[in-house]
Amino acid sequence: MSCACINAGFCHKNGRQNVELAMNIIFSRRQDVRPIVEECNQDVAPAPVETFTAVLLCYREKLPFKTTFPE
């Protein structure tokens, strides 16, 4: 999942999210969550996949709605 995120341009190689792209595409209708997206993107772990996981877990904890991935 981390590699797919990087390949799609939504994440950087260090595991952090491309906030601008996320806000323009994923959260385009919810600009009010930008502070949360930026806050979650600050969690930096030793390995990129751990950072990616930390960002997703932060979203689960702090966003006012549930995030899912299309099948």
Image (cartoon, helix red, strand yellow):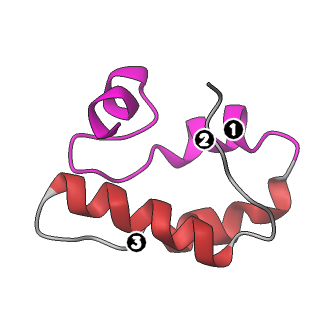
Q: Where residue 22 sits in the image (x, y, percent)?
A: 60, 41
Q: Residue at x 37, y 68 (%)?
A: 54
Q: Residue at x 23, y 62 (%)?
A: 50
Residue 58 lies, in percent from the top left, at: 51, 72
Q: Is residue 43 above or below residue 32?
A: below
Using residue 2 as the reference point, say whether residue 59 is left or right of it: right
Amino acid type at circle 2 is Ala
Res 22 label: 2
Which mark is on residue 49?
A: none
Q: Nearer the viewer, residue 4 or 36?
A: 4
Residue type at the position of mark 3: Gln
The residue lying furthest to the front in this view is 71
Q: Secondary structure at mark 3?
A: loop
Q: Residue 10: horizontal and vertical position, in percent? A: 46, 35
Q: Say whether residue 65 is left or right of residue 2.
A: right
Query: How far apart are the two marked residues, 2 and 3, measured between alpha carbons?
Result: 15 Å
Residue 6 is drawn in which quadrant?
A: top left
Tag 1 secondary structure: helix
Question: Compared to 7, does 36 lie above or below?
Answer: below
Packing grade of label 2 (10 A; few <14, some 14-19, many >=20) is some
In the image, 2: left or right of 61?
left
Q: Amino acid at mark 1?
A: Ile
Image: magenta residue range: 1-29
Tell me where residue 53 appears, x and y as whole percent: 35, 60
Q: Quadrant of the C terminus?
A: top right
Residue to which mark 1 is pinned = 26
